[in-house]
Amino acid sequence: MPMIKEANVGIGLYGNEGMSASQNADFAVGEFRFIWRLLFAHGRTFYINDTLNAFYYFYKNILLTVPQFMFAFVCGFSGQSIFDDVYISFYNAFITTWPVAGKVLFDMDINPKTDDAQLVNQLPLLYFESQQGLNFFQANFFKCILHAISHACFIFFLPYFIMDSKAITRENGQTADQWTMSLTMFYSLFLVVTMNLLINLKQHTVYNLFALVVMSIAPLSLTVSLSNYKAESWMHNVIHTTHASPSFHAAWFITVGCCSLIDFLILVKSFLYKPAMPEFLRRLRKEGRSLDEPQVKEQWEELIEDRKRYMHELELIHETIVNKKREQKELAFLKQQREPPEAEPEPQ
């Protein structure tokens, strides 16, 4: 019992000795053979998905805030938001929550139910990435931030220049205004976020596609309709005129196309030149080869060594930064000790 309580993740076993072990554990299984799947299949998968979930929340919130920051330079720092309050309130709480929840719950790079035994039996080897922490690392976090900022620039600048004051949105010749551009940016933002999830899906199943497509479009439609028919909203009666504008459709199509092309090229590059371990094993399975072959075994060991080398280089960079900060603090402390104390003013 004390071992289960002290462990980071306690696993109990149902047995004839009683229920105390299973009641005090984080997970309870009926037989020892279930521990293999709990650790290597579900444990590894949810570790990876939780990491992607954390990165995704930073990513989608940067896409929402950076256009507002850039709009401050356009509106003269007046404090005016580029997005309606309804959009900002519903974005995190309603629109983008269900798609990522579906991805975390249902997306698996290796599924023990559908994949063959040759691939499933390699799960203990694939646990290496989780042990070394290669997914949730500072370098990957900064890459996610830069990736999000680049997408946010596309989302702001492309609609801003396409939906300018010369873009005619109505039959009577009325041109685009701030809220027409706002709706274009928000549509582009939503589609870029959804396409990013679709491109990075590991398995396209019915549950994943339902969570990403249906459960994301329905909240968006409800939010846009609510703001359109709400008299107090800035977006009141904007949707109908904006949807009829060719400039609106050209703006979101070009924006989503540019951002999705970047995501697709990154995915292709990682698959061809630096594949992940599951992708490497899937390629072997399609080619009808196994890890027992000397050449394949050598490539597999090189892949593991490359991951270890990458992790070691990142640790050295982090250690160098920490040491430099420590040296700066020590130099500042020594400089403060060498300086003579300030003389007290003489009493008058």
Image: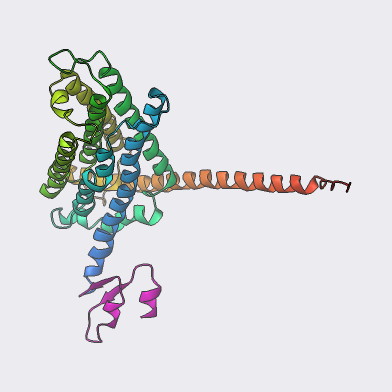
- The color scheme shown is rainbow
Residue at the bottom extreme?
17
Can you see residue 109? no
Which residue is nearer to you in this view: 226 or 123?
226
Q: Is residue 79 left or right of residue 265?
A: right
Q: Position of residue 169 (x, y in %)?
A: 17, 18
Determine if the magenta segment contains residue 13: yes
Q: Position of residue 68 (x, y in %)?
A: 35, 32
Question: From the viewer's perspective, is residue 257 above or below residue 194?
Answer: above
Residue at horizontal 12%, vertical 22%?
244
Determine if the magenta segment contains residue 102: no
Magenta-tinted stretch: 1-30
Q: Quadrant of the N terminus?
A: bottom left
Question: From the viewer's perspective, is residue 333 above or below residue 65?
Answer: below
Which residue is nearer to you in this view: 126 or 265?
265
Can you see residue 146? yes
Q: Position of residue 343 (x, y in %)?
A: 85, 46
Which residue is nearer to you in this view: 108 or 144?
144
Q: Position of residue 15 (x, y in %)?
A: 22, 82
Residue at horizontal 14%, vertical 38%?
221
Which residue is nearer to you in this view: 177 or 290?
177
Question: From the viewer's perspective, is residue 200 above or below residue 207?
Answer: above
Q: Is residue 317 left or right of residue 346?
A: left
Q: Is residue 334 left or right of residue 254?
A: right
Residue at horizontal 42%, vertical 28%?
77
- Figure disc tally: 0
